[in-house]
Image (cartoon, grey):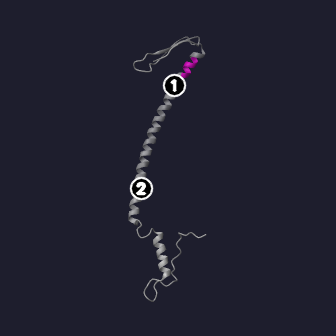
């Protein structure tokens, strides 16, 4: 099936102007289809389209730059988080070692609020024997 928006080749084998000096219907119809194909009588001109494309390209470049800066910042934050996770894993391993060996002692926990109190957990040979929640 033929594309209804397709423009046939120019009817160059047909006469352009008739004996009365008027454009022939064949050429009138083809030129009207050409005008419609390029946007009609009130379409945006090539210069304006070029300006709009330049503005769009500028916005894309700006957004790309902003995106790259944000990605760089996120990568930096991710590296910091990976370092913190590694430190926490080391601390947890040390605590697990103490617990596995039957830790006896008290672990003090941090206050939850500035006016709160520290908490504690007391272990005897790896068994929790008392605890005081932090506040």
Residue 88 tag number: 1
**Dot 2 surroundings within 10 Å: few (below 14), some, or many (20 or more)?**
few
State the mark number for residue 56: 2
Residue occupying image coordinates x 40% and y 18%: 115
Camera-nearest residue between 135 and 71: 135
Residue 127 placed where, x, y %?
Answer: 59, 13
Label 1's element?
A: helix
Q: Is residue 67 above or below residue 135?
A: below
Assess whether residue 108 is covered by the magenta stretch: no
Please check the rendered image and state whether residue 93 is part of the magenta-colored stretch, yes or no.
yes
Residue ID at (43%, 52%): 60
Please tell me whether mark 2 sits on a helix, a strand or a loop. helix
Quadrant of the rendered image containing residue 95: top right
Which quadrant is home to the N terminus?
A: bottom right
Decide: few, some or many residues near mark 1? Use Cα within 10 Å; few <14, some 14-19, many ≥20. Answer: few
The image shows residue 2 at horizontal and vertical percentages of 59, 70
Between 82 and 29, which is closer to the camera in this rendering?
Answer: 29
**Magenta span:** 92-97
Q: Position of residue 36 (x, y in %)?
A: 47, 70
Say which quarter of the image contains residue 135. Answer: top left
Q: Is residue 103 above or below residue 31?
A: above
């Amino acid at each position: 099936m033929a594309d209804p928006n397709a423009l046939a080749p120019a009817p160059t084998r047909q006469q352009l102007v008739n004996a009365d000096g008027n454009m022939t219907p064949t050429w009138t119809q083809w030129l009207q289809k050409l005008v419609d194909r390029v946007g009609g009588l009130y379409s945006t001109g090539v210069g304006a389209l070029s300006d709009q494309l330049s503005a769009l390209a500028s916005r894309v470049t700006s957004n790309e730059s902003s995106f790259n800066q944000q990605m760089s910042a996120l990568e930096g934050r991710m590296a910091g988080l990976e370092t913190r996770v590694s430190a926490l894993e080391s601390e947890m391993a040390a605590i697990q070692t103490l617990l596995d060996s039957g830790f006896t002692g008290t672990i003090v926990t941090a206050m939850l609020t500035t006016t709160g109190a520290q908490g504690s957990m007391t272990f005897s040979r790896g068994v929790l024997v008392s605890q005081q929640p932090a506040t």
